[in-house]
Image (spheres, helix red, strand yellow):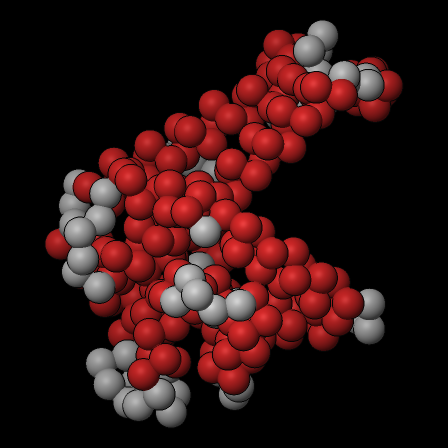
């Protein structure tokens, strides 16, 4: 079975059109939350340089002096702790967005509360993320390419966990390995086909379109793998 990525993209666009403007509004809300959390993290990590750093990043220029001052800053323990909590929150919200897109793709009720689905299986997602990162890192020690292959080999694990939260992290990784057998190259090409879109994301608000487009297309790939039979996603 060869999965037709053009069919996946067409299907993703149809799903976005059917759920407009909700899909764009919730994506925009998520991006605003990410922006606010990033701002908060910057101010906590660099309390004395927060405003100066923000202005430098807006200009796209970091002076050597500012970089040296940033390297010398030592945030307090409480600030570091809060920063780590914010980073975890960002990760869980990203997984929540994945849940939102899964519901959209299956024509189920989808809304803002889906963004918080990751917190409902917080420890399972966290453990799966740790194991995923560890496996990819270990394969990367052999060379860059084995690490990339491993990243694609286990890339379906998070979808599998959302579909069955009772599964263990290792079961999700093993099932992902089985699902992607013979299809990792196709998934890589699919991701590569979005390169131009990610470059366009340098333009403000383009990401509001690209994020659901990419996620829904990838979910279509997952559904095709899971079905295991030719259909509207396959040729």
Q: Residue 30's quadrant in the figure?
A: top left
- The percent coordinates of residue 23 (x first, y second) are 24, 45
In this view, the residue farthest toward the left is 18
**Is residue 99 among the parts visible in the rendering?**
yes
- The percent coordinates of residue 8 (x first, y second) are 30, 71
In the image, is 175 to the left or to the right of 219?
right
Q: Nearer the viewer, residue 31 or 174?
A: 174
Which residue is at a point 33% across and 74% down the rendered structure image?
223
Give the mark count.
0
Relative to 131, residue 200 above or below: above
Q: Residue 103's quadrant in the figure?
A: bottom left
- The percent coordinates of residue 227 (x first, y second) are 32, 83
**Is residue 6 among the parts visible in the rendering?**
no
- The percent coordinates of residue 178 (x first, y second) are 52, 84
Which residue is at a point 65% across and 72% down the rendered structure image?
150
Relative to 104, residue 122 above or below: above
Which residue is at a point 23% across and 56% down the rendered structure image?
104
Q: Nearer the viewer, residue 21 or 179?
A: 179
Relative to 221, residue 212 above or below: above
Q: Nearer the viewer, residue 54 or 80?
A: 80
Relative to 39, residue 173 above or below: below
Which residue is at a point 33% across and 34% down the rendered structure image?
28
Q: Nearer the viewer, residue 156 or 31?
A: 156
Q: Quadrant of the C terminus?
A: bottom left
Q: Quadrant of the N terminus?
A: bottom left
């Amino acid at each position: 079975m060869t999965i037709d990525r053009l069919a996946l993209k067409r299907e993703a666009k149809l799903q976005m059109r059917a759920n407009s403007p909700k899909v764009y509004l919730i994506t925009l809300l998520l991006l605003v939350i990410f922006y606010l959390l990033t701002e908060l993290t910057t101010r906590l990590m660099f309390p004395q340089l927060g405003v100066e750093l923000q202005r430098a990043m807006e200009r796209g220029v970091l002076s050597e002096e500012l970089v040296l001052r940033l390297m010398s800053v030592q945030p307090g323990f409480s600030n570091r702790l809060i920063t780590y909590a914010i980073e975890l929150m960002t990760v869980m919200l990203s997984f929540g967005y994945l849940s939102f897109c899964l519901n959209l793709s299956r024509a189920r009720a989808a809304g803002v509360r889906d963004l918080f689905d990751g917190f409902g299986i917080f420890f399972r997602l966290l453990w799966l993320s740790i194991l995923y990162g560890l496996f990819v890192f270990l394969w990367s020690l052999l060379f860059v390419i084995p690490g990339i292959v491993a990243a694609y080999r286990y890339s379906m694990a998070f979808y599998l966990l959302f579909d069955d939260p009772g599964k263990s992290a290792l079961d999700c990784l093993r099932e992902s390995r089985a699902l992607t057998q013979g299809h990792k190259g196709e998934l890589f090409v699919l991701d590569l086909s979005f390169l131009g879109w990610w470059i366009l994301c340098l333009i403000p608000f383009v990401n509001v379109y690209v994020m659901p487009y990419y996620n829904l297309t990838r979910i279509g790939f997952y559904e095709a793998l899971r079905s295991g039979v030719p259909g509207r996603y396959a040729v």
